[in-house]
Image (spheres, rainbow, N blue to C red):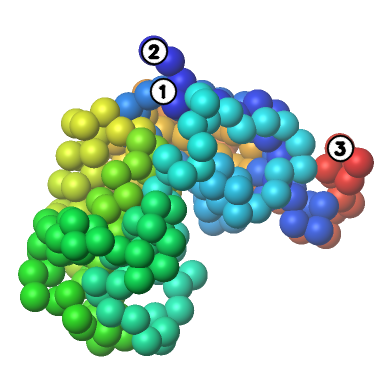
């Protein structure tokens, strides 16, 4: 099976200290993959490197000929300022930003599709609501509607089920399963090992370095999880900068 995403010797560093260190892996077209690892393992950094939000120090990222406009990215909710005076509909229309630019460029068709996406995530009638008035679960539904509108081939989700209720999690997981059925490539950062095992056929286990990648049952074996934990406990935040990253 061909790869939708290939990383080769990828290193990303902050102040020359690697957040992910010489990672090499392939993600198959249409794969549904959980990205798992201890706190600070580089999971979010991996997604940000793929979309170009953080600069790689070394290595390569191959998107199989796609531009980054073909990627949808859902950040952690904590990274978003919900105090900005913007409505649910306007947030969802940001999913068409690459095509239409500002809100003024949205056509009647774009708005119709945005309203349809809002209805698909269970928020019919919320179009004009300010995002500052939404609960955590409602706002996460809005972000999923934005991803729906992007109609992307590769979808990157950073802790999408964190701090939301069980019903919202189930509804949004159903959307993820639908994307998988449509043969879209989905990478999802998770903390819940049981959810990764139950819902995601493939997994990537990180501890700044790649511990394992492949079928979830093998990747998230007890031995691999123990190894990842040991690597995390051995991290030295005061260590000298990686020499290769410093070049």
Mark-to-mark CA distance, 1 and 2: 6 Å
Going from N to C along the chain, the mark reached first, 1 or 2, is 2
- Number of numbered discs overlaid on the protein picture: 3
Name the residue rendered at 32%, 50% in the picture: 150
In percent of width and height, residue 235 lies at 71, 50
In percent of width and height, residue 32 lies at 32, 33
Name the residue rendered at 58%, 28% in the picture: 62
Q: In this rendering, is residue 70 above or below 124? A: above
Q: In this rendering, is residue 203 above or below 168? A: above
Q: Circle 3 is placed at which residue position?
A: 244
Note whether residue 93 is visible. yes
Q: Circle 2 is placed at which residue position?
A: 1
Q: Which quarter of the picture shows residue 211?
A: top right
Name the residue rendered at 35%, 42% in the picture: 152
Mark 1 or 3: in front is 1
SS of the residue under disc 1: strand
Tell me the quadrant of the picture where the C terminus can be found. Answer: top right
Q: Nearer the viewer, residue 244 or 240?
A: 244
Badge number at residue 28: 1
Q: Which quarter of the picture shows residue 218?
A: top left
Determine whether label 1 and label 2 are within 8 Å by CB: yes
Name the residue rendered at 77%, 43% in the picture: 57
Tell me the quadrant of the picture where the N terminus can be found. Answer: top left
Label 2 Cα crowd, 10 Å radius (few <14 / some 14-19 / many 20+): few
Left or right, residue 27 beside residue 181: right
Going from N to C along the chain, the mark reached first, 1 or 3, is 1
Q: In this rendering, is residue 211 above or below 81? A: above
In percent of width and height, residue 16 lies at 82, 52
In percent of width and height, residue 28 lies at 41, 23
Mark 3 or 2: in front is 2
Determine whether label 3 and label 2 are within 8 Å by CB: no
Note whether residue 159 is visible. no
């Amino acid at each position: 099976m061909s790869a939708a995403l290939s990383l080769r010797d990828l290193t990303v560093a902050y102040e020359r200290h690697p957040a992910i260190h010489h990672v090499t892996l392939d993600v198959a077209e249409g794969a549904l993959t959980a990205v798992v690892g201890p706190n600070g393992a580089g999971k979010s950094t991996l997604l940000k490197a793929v979309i170009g939000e953080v600069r790689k120090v070394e290595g390569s990222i191959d998107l199989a000929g796609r531009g980054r406009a073909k990627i949808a990215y859902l950040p952690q909710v904590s990274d978003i300022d919900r105090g900005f005076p913007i409505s649910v509909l306007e947030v969802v229309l940001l999913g068409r930003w690459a095509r239409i630019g500002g809100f003024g460029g949205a056509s009647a068709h774009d708005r119709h599709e945005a309203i349809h996406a809002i209805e698909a995530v269970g928020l019919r009638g919320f179009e004009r609501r300010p995002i500052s008035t939404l609960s955590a679960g409602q706002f996460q539904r809005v972000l999923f509607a934005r991803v729906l509108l992007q109609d992307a081939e590769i979808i990157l989700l950073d802790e999408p089920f964190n701090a939301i209720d069980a019903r919202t999690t189930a509804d949004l997981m159903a959307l993820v399963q639908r994307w998988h059925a449509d043969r879209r490539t989905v990478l999802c950062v998770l903390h819940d090992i049981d959810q990764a095992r139950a819902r995601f056929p493939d997994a990537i286990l990180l501890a700044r370095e790649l511990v394992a990648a492949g079928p979830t049952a093998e990747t998230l074996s007890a031995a691999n999880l123990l190894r990842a934990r040991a690597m995390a406990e051995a991290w030295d935040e005061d260590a000298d900068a990686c020499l290769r990253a410093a070049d």
